[in-house]
Image: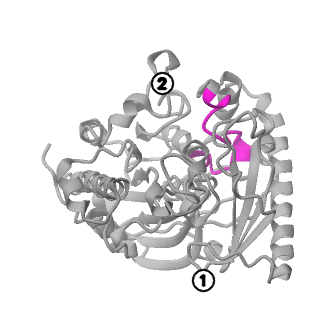
């Protein structure tokens, strides 16, 4: 396939507000009526996998080069203070798709029975999850073709509501977190370009879910990129990770360039986010607790620290919003209502995110929230049994509340090094959140603690009511 350098003009908006809607409006009883689709934008959703919020050249990384994402950022409204609902891929993706927190949709970790039985497809849990609306199902119910590639944990692409895709989701054939879909990017882009051609020929608007297994391990970048980032004094795992970040960027350039080549850029909304952060183990090698982690550094993936939950979020949509850099807080749960609004459709009324094409709604936000549960164990129907942290970011303040989580004698718990009941950070003074101020700002701790506990209590009450209603619905 011919590689085309992306040069489109894009702009857009994405962020979050966390106000809780009435639990009586659980689901839209009927999908919005189908209207003419020719004027609806195509939707391209790009998700990087295990990449720290700092690791882009458009955000000032001194070594990593991401020229194609830099170009997308220049044409987008970029939220540098974006956050995900959970610092782990499976619950993070489930929250992006549904616009709900992990304890609301039930997917809190990667596995049901830890490494004893890496059960991805727990039937009751998955059946319950698939009853929740998603932006994927909303779009395909209203005339969109939708293609899945890359990460997708919840069964096959058909289970997720896609019309086209790569993931079969069959555990008997090794289906787990994407299976055949994980080849995208690493083994070329042809499934995606073929789908774009098919949708264009059919004159249908399309959704493209591009969630490649990049820069995620295995870190096996092309030799030319590894040579570029290898240098004296730089650890091998760091060099490999840097090279993987640029490899991911190259695939984004191919995708965006193909939209340009097919003259689709002007009517395409592009949304970018990362599922969770990551840092190479060698970057934290001097930490005495490093041995508790394998494969990556402390306070990154799987943790509520900034390198676990923070991500740039950007949306590009030509002619709709001027490109800009925003200091506002943004959140992954905004993606569903924002995509729905861009397509002229109604998202479920009970979503806690907002349409961020609405500037007034963005300005009303005062805080964002999230959770961290055990990585390798879920308790279907009882999500808080594995709860490890609740957190809140309000302005420059960030508070983390510690919870007991799971039985650490049964499963290796990567968070046992951090036993402080609360941790408070001022992110303006310490952007990576590494100077605990809880002992000197007890007033801020108490105020944010009450805010977190109230948010969690109300959101849990809502989740329980929704679950009762969903149990009565067919799958």
Q: Answer above or below: position of 321 versus 255.
A: below
The reply to whether the magenta stretch includes residue 99 is yes
Residue 339: in sight, yes or no? yes
Q: Is residue 97 shown in magenta?
A: yes
> Which segment did they paint magenta?
95-115
Instruction: Give the residue at x 42% y 79%.
Output: 324
What residue sits 27% from the left and 51% below the top?
251
Query: Is residue 24 at all visible to an observer of this figure?
Result: no
Q: Residues within 10 Å of mark 1 (few under 14, many from 20)?
A: few
Q: Where is residue 110 in the image (x, y as percent from the top left)?
A: 60, 38
407 sits left or right of 236 in the view: right
Residue 83 drawn above or below residue 176: below
Distance from label 2 to label 1 (Cα)? 43 Å
Q: Which of marks 2 and 1 is nearer the N terminus?
A: 2
Count neighbours of disc 2 (C-alpha within 10 A) and say few if under 14, some if 14 to 19, many if 20 or more: many
Residue at 63 percent across and 55 percent down: it is 85
Report the residue at 56% width, 62% height from top.
287
Question: In the image, residue 106 lies at what x, y percent?
Answer: 71, 39
Q: In this view, does 460 lie above or below 419?
A: above
Say what secondary structure mark 1 lies in: loop
Looking at the rendered image, the disc whose residue lies closer to the viewer, 2 or 1, is 1
Q: Nearer the viewer, residue 236 or 223?
A: 236
In this rendering, position of residue 7 left or right of residue 466:
left
The quarter of the picture where the N terminus appears is top left
Work out which quarter of the rendered image holds the C terminus and state it: top right
- Residue on which disc 2 sits: 175
Residues at circles 2 and 1 in contact by the CB criterion of under 8 Å: no
Horizontal and vertical percent for residue 399?
Answer: 74, 70
Kindly identify which residue carries mark 1: 428
What secondary structure is found at the residue carrying circle 2?
A: loop
């Amino acid at each position: 396939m011919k590689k085309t350098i992306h040069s489109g003009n894009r702009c857009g908006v994405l962020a979050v507000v966390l106000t809780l809607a009435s639990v009586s409006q659980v689901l839209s009883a009927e999908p919005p009526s189908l209207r003419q689709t020719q004027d609806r934008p195509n939707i391209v959703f790009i998700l990087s996998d295990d990449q720290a919020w700092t690791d882009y050249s458009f955000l000032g990384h001194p070594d990593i080069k991401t020229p194609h994402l830099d170009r997308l950022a220049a044409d987008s409204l970029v939220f540098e203070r974006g956050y995900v609902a959970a610092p782990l891929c499976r619950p993070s993706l489930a929250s992006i798709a549904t616009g709900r927190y992990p304890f609301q949709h039930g997917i809190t970790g990667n596995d049901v029975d830890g490494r004893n039985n890496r059960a991805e497809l727990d039937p009751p849990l998955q059946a319950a999850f698939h009853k929740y609306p998603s932006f994927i199902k909303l779009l395909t119910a209203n005339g969109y073709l939708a293609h899945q590639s890359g990460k997708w944990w919840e069964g096959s692409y058909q289970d997720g509501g896609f019309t086209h895709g790569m993931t079969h989701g069959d555990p008997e054939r090794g289906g787990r977190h994407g299976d055949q879909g994980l080849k995208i990017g690493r083994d070329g882009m042809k499934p995606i370009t073929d789908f774009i051609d098919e949708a264009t020929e059919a004159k249908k608007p399309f959704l493209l879910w591009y969630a490649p297994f990049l820069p995620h391990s295995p870190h096996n970048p092309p030799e030319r990129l590894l040579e570029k980032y290898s240098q004296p004094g730089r650890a091998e795992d760091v060099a490999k990770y840097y090279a993987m970040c640029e490899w991911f960027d190259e695939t984004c350039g191919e995708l965006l360039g193909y939209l340009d080549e097919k003259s689709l850029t002007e009517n395409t909304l592009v949304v970018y986010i990362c599922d969770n952060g990551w840092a190479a183990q060698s970057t934290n090698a001097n930490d005495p607790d490093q041995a508790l982690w394998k494969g990556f550094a402390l306070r990154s993936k799987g943790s509520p620290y900034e390198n676990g939950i923070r991500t740039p979020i950007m949306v590009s949509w030509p002619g709709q919003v001027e490109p800009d850099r925003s200091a506002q807080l943004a959140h992954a749960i905004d993606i569903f209502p924002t995509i729905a609004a861009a397509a002229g459709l109604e998202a479920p009324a009970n979503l806690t995110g907002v349409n961020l094409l609405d500037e007034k709604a963005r300005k009303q936000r005062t805080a964002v929230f999230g959770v961290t549960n055990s990585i390798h164990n879920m308790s279907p129907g009882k999500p808080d049994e594995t709860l490890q942290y609740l957190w809140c970011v309000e302005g420059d303040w960030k508070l983390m509340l510690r919870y007991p989580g799971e039985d650490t004698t049964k499963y290796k718990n990567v968070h046992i090094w951090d036993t402080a009941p609360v941790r408070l950070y001022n992110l303006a003074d310490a952007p990576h959140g590494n100077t605990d101020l809880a002992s000197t700002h007890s007033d801020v701790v108490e105020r944010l603690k009450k805010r977190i506990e109230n948010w969690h209590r109300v959101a849990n009450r809502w989740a329980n009511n929704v679950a009762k209603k969903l149990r009565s619905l067919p799958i």
